[in-house]
Image: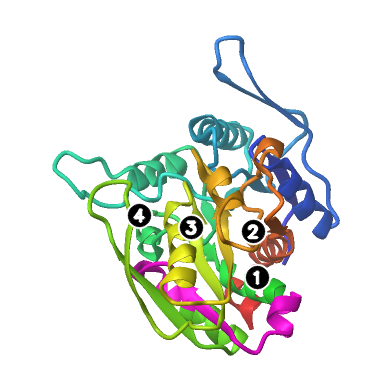
Amino acid sequence: MENKRILIAGNSNLELAEGIAKELKAKLCEAKISQFSDGECSVQINESVRGADVYVIQSMSTPVNDNLMELLVMNDALKRASANRITAVVPYFGYARQDRKARARDPITAKLVADILTKSGASRLLTMDLHAPQLQGFFDIPVDSLLGIPVLAKAMEKMDFIKDDKNLMVVSPDVGSVARARQMAEMLNVPFAIVDKRRPKANEVEIMHIVGNVEGKTCLLVDDMIDTAGTICNGAKALLEVGKAKKVYVCCTHAVLSGPAVERLQNSVIEKVFTLNTISVPKDKKFSKLIEVSVAPIFAKAIQAINTGSPVSKLYE
């Protein structure tokens, strides 16, 4: 049975929110999310949400603290307005990389954010490609983490360099992304390799060698996110210089693109960078090599499944 459904969007990724609403043949809730003169978050919801299942669409992208507070304040406003159930639709979940104590006196911010998100009124989280799957265990509410690789794989299959190249090879930029790269390789029915690296010190990457023969191959580097782009650019360079690959393409779920990322990618040996639009890339960070793939259809299907009580897992069958 389908419950009354309302979609509301924060300011982090309005284009994606509008795309999801269009897929669902719905409209976004009338609301004004802004800031007071001192920078505090202001939320004004201009229609009734009483008894409704509300889906709050907001990515925790830059400026992450502002976007997180918007999400929390929207949840609180909806809870106090008697919404029946609040689903936080967070395509990119920030603060996920601090998921353990790596050093003495480190915080575990992933758990902290999970707790305050739940406390704010969220009764479910819908996200995509959490940095580590075990983060789902940090929440005391149901978590649906959609998979970005199937969406990227479908987009890749339509690209000429995939269809016309018989020497395609999927490559993991590090050991941590092996499972992700293997999944992409299986979906595209091609072999995969691994770039093995070690870090001499923080923020420096030294490429050691490549596990697998990439000589003469067109390589597709696969990762969950591109932050400063150091790892991915060094990996691409190693594939050409060390592995003697022919060309290198890159795809990822989350285009964080902080610091020197755009300059590094634009000036790198990479041919094209494919990314999902879980994060809204501002105009000043768009570059000629960047190609965005929309996740609006998969999020719309997931919202429909949650709203009707259907299994989200069937979206991938």
Q: Which residue is mark 2?
A: 276
Q: Which residues are magenta?
A: 157-181
Q: Earlier in the sequence, mark 4 or mark 2?
A: 4
Outermost right residue: 25
Alpha carbon separation for disc pair 4 and 3 = 32 Å
The span from disc 1 to disc 4 (Cα, nearest Å) is 26 Å
In this view, which residue lies farthest toward the top? 37
Asked if the stretch drawn in magenta spans residue 129, the answer is no
In the figure, 153 relative to 284: above or below?
below
Q: Amino acid at mark 4?
A: Phe
Foreground pick, 66 / 177: 177
Based on the picture, tell me whether residue 159 belongs to the magenta stretch: yes
Other-residue count near label 2 (Cα within 10 Å), few / some / many at <14 / 14–19 / ≥20: many
Q: Which residue is mark 4?
A: 138
Identify residue type, mark 3: Cys
Look at 41% across and 69% down and name the residue there: 177
At horizontal 48% and vertical 77% (from top left) the residue drawn is 244
Whether pointer 1 and pointer 2 mark residues with C-beta atoms closer than 8 Å, the reply is yes
